[in-house]
Amino acid sequence: MNLLRIFAVAAALLALFVWGFFSSPFADHEDVGPPEREPAVRDNFYDVAVRDDFAWIVGYHGTILRSQDRGVSWQLQQSGTSEPLFRISLVSADEAWISGGYGTILHTSDGGKSWHKQQTGIEEHLFGINFIDESRGWAVGSRGAVLSTDDGGATWVNRSLGDDVTLNDVRFVDSKQGWAVGEFGRIYHTRDGGLHWEKQNSPVEVAFTSGTSRNLFRLLSNAQELWAFGLDGVILTSKDGVKWTTAAMADSSSGAAKQYHLFSASSAGPKQWAVGERGTILVSSGDGNWHESGVKTLPSNLNGVAFGSDGTGLIVGNRGTILRSDNGGTRWTPVKIALTHTSSAVN
């Protein structure tokens, strides 16, 4: 891979997340607190996770926010890094892992009171991370990076693909079977816990020489189905984890939404939600069809969505965007961030 392409790939990935940096729907110049804290308020938020009453948000400037009241108010946590943080995986209200730029993986076992950097041994950007319990986890990233651990991240084993491809997400359904998706629309599958990976047939895969982008950014799964989401509103689905097909939109009026890239997805009961470029929010009622949700947003990129078991939903995006629902996505309201001058709390 020549130097020009390395920069091109990195620039393209970051551009998809940060192009809307200056168009926050909820920024307020008078309520953001001291200037030195502005990055935490106006950061580009890349991911969100919900567990019971607790939630986390991660962002570009090493930002970590935690809520103890289902996303109503937020506290700023000390990450110990200024590297961009792309993804969070949590297994309880206290234990979580975050992946980020230049091989960064952070871990907490005390609800984020302290975050510790784990030794990964690589410098690749880690765009995806997935833990299925307190011990077993995987991370993926640029230049085919794949890492695995079976001791909670005390040691990470490099199991990179050897293919010159950026991987954006990884998801395991048990200790053996998992998938990774990324650049060129590629989908990889493992049956042995990540020791070996095989490339599956993807309906949107293109060759590097084609000059066409077909990145897949996020995976979602439940007991019956797998989904993959990506550029130009692409949604792929698989019932058996082997054969992938393109999911249909609900009606032709949703054609405009197809143009916008989809960066994240989550399930809420029988429904699935996907969010992306320019405020795009799509929903599926579980019948295989997707349609625009009707939620009114300003055209800022939405990079992460997550639901808790009680129907609490959170959407995060560029320039400090946070949307919250307490009824499974029927209604969404903006959460306005305002730092106080006397503490690190974010309300």
Image (tube, grey):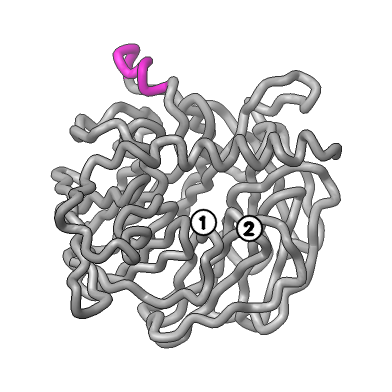
Foreground residue among 339 and 134? 339
Disc 1 residue type?
A: Phe
Are the residues flagged by discs 2 and 1 in contact, CB closer than 8 Å? yes
The residue pinned by badge 1 equals 86
Foreground residue among 72 and 129? 72
Question: CA separation, marks 2 and 1?
Answer: 7 Å
Which residue is at a point 48% across and 48% down the rendered structure image? Answer: 220
Which residue is at a point 71% across and 72% down the rendered structure image? Answer: 120
Q: SS at mark 2?
A: strand
Foreground residue among 264 and 46? 46
Is 321 contained in the magenta span? no
Residue 97 locus on image (x, y percent): 52, 72
Q: Is residue 145 left or right of residue 271?
A: right
Quadrant showing the N terminus = top right
**Residue count near mark 1 (Cα–Cα under 10 Å), binned few <14, some 14–19, many ≥20:** many
The residue pinned by badge 2 equals 126
Q: Which residues are magenta?
A: 251-258
Residue 75 locus on image (x, y percent): 27, 73
Residue situated furthest front in the rendering: 35
Residue 273 locus on image (x, y percent): 34, 42
Q: Name the image quarter holding residue 5.
A: top right
